């Protein structure tokens, strides 16, 4: 068996052959012509025959139907270098754009033995060795490969497709598009295994396929990594591993890593996943597992963009994303416009985990991302534990996340821990935390300087301690200069807890609380007193509808125009994309109100002043407070039709009785000795 397998590899290498005139070869299992492959009428009925007659530069068109590689398990279809394989034809097309691979399904099947018994199926439905960038697989369903019981290392990888480099090509990158991979199994890489070629003489010859617009369903790895896809080995310097517009569903890596995808040894690589859906999986570790087990000065880059992770079911410490075994590595990780929804982990984190040695560092940006309805076991749905942390969370929502076994009062929904002799810096901007079983936890080990800044965020009904800090014994060296500092600015903290919103879990007696809260809105002084200024303690933040999950501000919320502009830095918009400053001063919280009940001084637009009126809305009695030295010469009330319904000159009393006005929205125009103020008033 192995000897024949080796001959197939040589066959794939030699099939490249010399360059010749490009031709199109036709395959239709129902054709009744001469079987020359020169037209649909005379199409080959055997796909293997077409592949055997193809050379570099040729294109093969395959009509709908089911094609099998042979009768022996070691036989497979070869992805010959430079040959383009297209499926999805009815058998009458004259142009590639006329095909429809959804209507005319072209199946490459490994079910060569007893129907619906997978243990006698093909080890690999397709194999590719040294396939270059002109090599294409497009418009096929690849299914029922079974490489679980092959005893050789190479034979046990990639039930659907097995890709390796070649000594004849320094670098290969075939293209796989518009394909479906269904019910494939292998020890590694149930649907696809991406490997490399190495020898002492030739060195490394990597392969980096482009995979776009593909669907992976019900693929499995037993007992190793990568239920749908296992991607191992080096890439060429400067190249990016990219998956785009792909769907992964019902993948399984029962005992190990990467239910959907396992990226093995990605140190120094760049990975980009765009517009991908990862739905329903079971694994011992993460849905996506990234392994960095070598020390390197070359940074590793991971970028997840417009991806959805949902319905994960796990039973280990890892979540939907698991990045581990970082040594002396530097990683840049960006997660943009993603959703983590209804992921569940029985024994650990359900969203993401990043772990590394003291010499590791991560620069993490999570932006415009929703983390909702996830369940973990206990202590942190999102956990980052590396040497040096630089993390930024911006425009993110954390909603309705919980724990299976309950949580202790110090549990953090997000837990970040710096480790040994490094600076850890974390920022949260325009973020919403509501109805979670945990808040934020910041932990320090030996000799760590930890800075956290939370700006224009909203916290509503989370854990008892919304903010927790914890220290480890090595932090308690006498006289050390290290710290764990949290600054909270322009934020709403609305919790039902009757005690402090923060916890300083420090059994070592250090004076290290360093909580600074300023220009923020809190429900009660019992939530804590802070060495800062500008805080408001109010009866209600006046959200639009907190029970329905709408945490925007009502027109007359005490958070409107109550923040400090100096803190917003680069924030030009709020969590909803509204301009951050609408009426001269920034609002408190994650959302900017689009209207205000304050009367605005309009004479000099560069110097906006406010005239506070209250109550607003009201049932008719309107009270106002003027800047010192201001005299009112005229007050006018104008209805929605533009009609003046009330006018009074020389106003000396700071209250006006307007009970005779009908309910509705009115404009107030107030002329004074310093200018004119205008604003909106709502009559209840």
Image (tube, grey):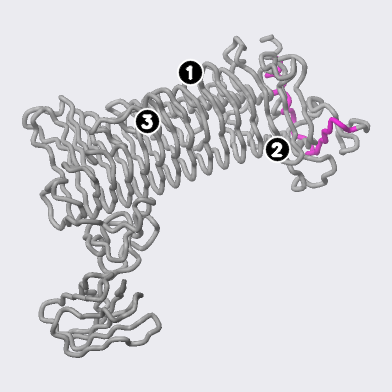
Q: Position of residue 261 (x, y in %)?
A: 51, 29
Label 1 and label 2: CA atoms lie apart by 32 Å
Residue 268 can be seen in this image: no
Is residue 400 on the magenta stretch? no
The label on residue 376 is: 3
Q: Quadrant of residue 437?
A: top left
| Left or right for 427, reference 371 | left
Q: Residue furthest front?
A: 660
Q: Nearer the viewer, residue 527 or 62?
A: 527
Q: Quadrant of residue 577?
A: bottom left
Q: Which tag, 1 or 2, sits closer to the chain's start?
A: 2
Q: Which tag, 3 or 2, sits closer to the chain's start?
A: 2
According to the picture, the residue beneath numbered tag 2 turns out to be 139
Q: Which residues are magenta?
A: 7-31
Secondary structure beneath disc 2? Answer: loop
Q: Nearer the viewer, residue 620 or 59?
A: 620
Q: Position of residue 252 (x, y in %)?
A: 53, 24
């Amino acid at each position: 068996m192995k000897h024949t397998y080796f001959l197939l590899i040589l066959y794939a290498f030699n099939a490249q052959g010399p360059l010749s005139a490009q031709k199109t070869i036709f395959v239709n299992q129902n054709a009744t012509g001469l079987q020359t492959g020169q037209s649909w009428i005379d199409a080959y009925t055997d796909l293997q025959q077409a592949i055997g007659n193809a050379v570099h530069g040729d294109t093969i068109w395959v009509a709908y139907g089911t094609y099998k590689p042979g009768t022996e398990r070691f036989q497979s279809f070869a992805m010959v270098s430079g040959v383009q394989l297209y499926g999805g034809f009815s058998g009458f097309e004259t142009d590639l754009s006329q095909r429809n691979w959804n209507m005319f399904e072209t199946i490459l099947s490994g079910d060569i033995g007893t129907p619906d018994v997978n243990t006698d199926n093909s080890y690999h439905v397709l194999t590719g060795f040294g396939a270059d960038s002109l090599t294409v697989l497009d418009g096929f369903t690849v299914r029922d490969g079974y490489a679980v019981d092959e005893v050789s290392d190479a034979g046990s990888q990639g039930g659907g497709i097995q890709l390796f480099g070649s000594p004849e090509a320094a670098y290969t990158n075939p293209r796989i598009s518009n394909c479906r991979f269904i019910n494939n199994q292998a020890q590694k890489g149930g649907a696809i295994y991406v490997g490399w070629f190495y020898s002492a003489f030739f060195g490394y010859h990597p392969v980096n396929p482009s995979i776009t617009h593909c669907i992976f369903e019900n693929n499995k790895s037993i007992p190793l990594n990568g239920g749908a896809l296992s991607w191992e080995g080096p890439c060429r310097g400067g190249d990016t591993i990219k998956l785009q517009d792909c769907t992964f569903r019902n993948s399984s890596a029962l005992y190990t890593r990467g239910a959907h995808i396992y990226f093995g040894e990605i140190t120094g690589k760049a990975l980009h996943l765009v517009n991908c859906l990862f739905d329903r999986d079971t694994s011992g570790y993460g849905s996506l597992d990234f392994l960095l087990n070598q020390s390197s000065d070359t940074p590793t880059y991971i970028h997840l963009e417009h991806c959805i992770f949902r319905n994960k079911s796990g039973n280990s410490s890892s979540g939907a994303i698991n990045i581990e075994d970082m040594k002396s590595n530097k990683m840049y990780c960006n997660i943009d416009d993603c959703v983590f929804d209804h992921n569940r982990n029985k024994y650990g984190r359900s969203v993401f985990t990043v772990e590394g040695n003291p010499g590791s560092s991560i620069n993490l940006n999570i932006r415009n991302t929703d983390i909702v309805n996830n369940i973990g076991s206990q202590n942190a749905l999102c956990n980052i534990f590396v040497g040096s942390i630089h993390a930024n969370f911006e425009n993110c929502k954390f909603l309705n996340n919980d724990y299976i076994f309950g949580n202790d009062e110090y549990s953090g929904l997000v837990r970040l821990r710096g480790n040994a002799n490094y600076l850890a810096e974390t920022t949260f901007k325009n973020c919403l935390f509501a109805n979670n079983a945990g808040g934020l936890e910041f932990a320090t080990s030996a000799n760590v300087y930890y800075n956290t800044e939370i700006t224009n965020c909203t916290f509503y009904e989370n854990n008892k301690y919304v903010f927790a800090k914890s220290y480890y014994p090595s932090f308690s060296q006498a006289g050390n200069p290290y710290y764990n500092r949290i600054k909270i600015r322009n934020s709403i903290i609305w919790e039902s807890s009757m005690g402090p919103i923060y916890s300083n879990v420090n059994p070592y007696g250090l004076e290290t609380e360093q909580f600074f809260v300023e220009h923020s809105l809190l429900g009660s002084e019992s939530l804590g007193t802070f060495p800062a200024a500008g805080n408001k303690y109010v009866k209600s933040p006046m959200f639009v509808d907190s029970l329905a999950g709408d945490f925007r501000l009502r027109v007359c919320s005490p958070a409107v125009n109550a923040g400090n502009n100096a803190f917003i830095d680069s924030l030009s918009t709020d969590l909803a994309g509204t301009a951050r400053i609408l009426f001269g001063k920034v609002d408190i919280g994650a959302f900017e109100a689009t209207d205000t009940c304050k009367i605005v001084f309009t004479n000099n637009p560069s110097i906006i002043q406010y005239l506070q009126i209250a109550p607003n809305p009201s049932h008719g009695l309107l009270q106002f407070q003027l800047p010192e030295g201001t005299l009112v010469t005229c007050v006018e009330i104008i209805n929605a039709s533009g009609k003046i319904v009330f006018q009074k000159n020389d106003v000396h009393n700071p209250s006006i009785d307007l009970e005779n006005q009908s309910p509705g929205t009115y404009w107030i125009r107030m002329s004074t000795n310093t200018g004119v103020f205008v604003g909106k008033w709502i009559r209840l």
